[in-house]
Image (tube, grey):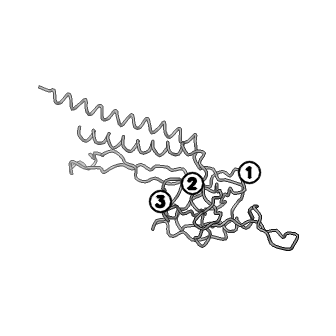
């Protein structure tokens, strides 16, 4: 009966992790560049209590063996913002946070901010992190230059979007599935993914955004299935507890 109790317990823990993953997917259904996740469940260790009866094996529940990212390309939507970019390939944009840590992202909803440290306007991500070029440097916004009546070159306040698009770095890794999924819709490079390599040959689409890869209807069905499995595991614990109560009350 103790085995049944712990079997139900492991099942509840595994199904709760699955619920968290599916709920996180649904919460990010409208997040730009978000990649949905899928948990993979596995059975815990089986124990053979009688060597003369090899078919008499007792399991110990289940656990979440791994969580995979769904790397298929999301749907593109056209935007009226000239600083929105999408990647029609398996590349990534690279950003750097205020602590100097670099991350990869598929979120191309960029904007412009004034960097007081260098006295220049620079490109930032939706989270306010600086977008990097192919050399790993901040991207200073190029402005159009016009010639006045006296023949002097004058910098205008109009952004040179063609030059800016060429400056934005696109990176790739050898193994996307080896990336570490961190917060704020970013990915960290790991030894399993390989180092991020500049890919200047990769195209970018301006005034477009890649939406998430979440299958809303599918994840709603999976939540219902996972809830049912969670309830079944809870019923196992309840039944095991009831048997223990009966055994303790035997005279």
Q: Residues within 10 Å of mark 1 (few under 14, many from 20)?
A: few
Total numbered labels? 3
- Give residue 127's mark: 2
- Give residue 80's mark: 1
Residue under the point 82% across and 68% down: 146
Residue under the point 58% across and 39% down: 217
Tell me where residue 73 sits by quadrant. bottom right
Please provide percent x and percent y for residue 197.
57, 71
Q: CA distance from mark 2 to mark 3?
A: 18 Å
Residue that mark 3 sits on: 180
Q: CA distance from mark 1 to mark 2?
A: 20 Å
Q: Residues within 10 Å of mark 3 (few under 14, many from 20)?
A: some
- Residue nearest the observer in this picture, 55 or 22: 22
Quarter of the image with the N terminus in it: top left
Q: Is residue 30 above or below residue 139?
A: above
Q: CA distance from mark 1 to mark 3?
A: 32 Å
Of mark 2 and mark 3, the one earlier in the sequence is 2
Q: Are marks 1 and 3 in contact (CB under 8 Å)?
A: no
Please provide percent x and percent y for residue 18.
44, 44
Quarter of the image with the C terminus in it: top left
Q: Are marks 1 and 2 in contact (CB under 8 Å)?
A: no
Find numbered disc 1 in the image and state the secondary structure of the residue it sits on. Answer: loop
Q: Are marks 2 and 3 in contact (CB under 8 Å)?
A: no
Residue closest to the far left: 251
Q: Residues within 10 Å of mark 2 (few under 14, many from 20)?
A: some
Please provide percent x and percent y for residue 132.
60, 66
Q: Nearer the viewer, mark 1 or mark 2?
A: 2
Find numbered disc 3 in the image and state the secondary structure of the residue it sits on. Answer: strand
Tell me where residue 6 sits by quadrant. top left
Residue closest to the far right: 149
């Amino acid at each position: 009966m103790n085995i049944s109790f712990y079997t139900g317990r492991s099942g509840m823990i595994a199904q709760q992790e699955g619920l968290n993953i599916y709920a996180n997917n649904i919460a990010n259904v409208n997040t730009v560049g978000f990649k949905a996740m899928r948990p993979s469940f596995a059975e815990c260790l089986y124990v053979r209590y009688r060597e003369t009866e090899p078919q008499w094996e007792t399991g110990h529940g289940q656990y979440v063996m791994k969580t995979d990212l769904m790397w298929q390309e999301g749907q593109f939507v056209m935007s009226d913002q000239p600083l929105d970019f999408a990647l029609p390939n398996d590349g990534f944009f690279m950003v750097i946070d205020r602590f100097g840590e670099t991350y990869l992202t598929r979120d191309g909803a960029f904007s412009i901010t004034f960097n007081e440290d260098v006295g220049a306007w620079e490109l930032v991500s939706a989270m306010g992190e600086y977008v990097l070029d192919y050399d790993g440097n901040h991207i200073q916004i190029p402005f159009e230059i016009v010639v006045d009546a006296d023949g002097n070159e004058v910098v205008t306040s109009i952004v040179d979007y063609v030059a800016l698009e060429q400056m934005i770095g696109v990176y790739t890794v050898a193994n996307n599935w080896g990336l570490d999924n961190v917060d704020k819709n970013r990915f960290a490079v790991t030894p399993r993914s390989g180092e991020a390599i500049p890919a200047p040959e990769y195209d970018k689409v301006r005034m477009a955004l890649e939406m998430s890869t979440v299958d809303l209807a599918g994840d709603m069905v999976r939540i219902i299935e996972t809830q049912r499995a969670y309830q079944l595991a809870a019923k196992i614990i309840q039944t095991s507890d009831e048997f223990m109560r009966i055994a303790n009350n035997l005279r």
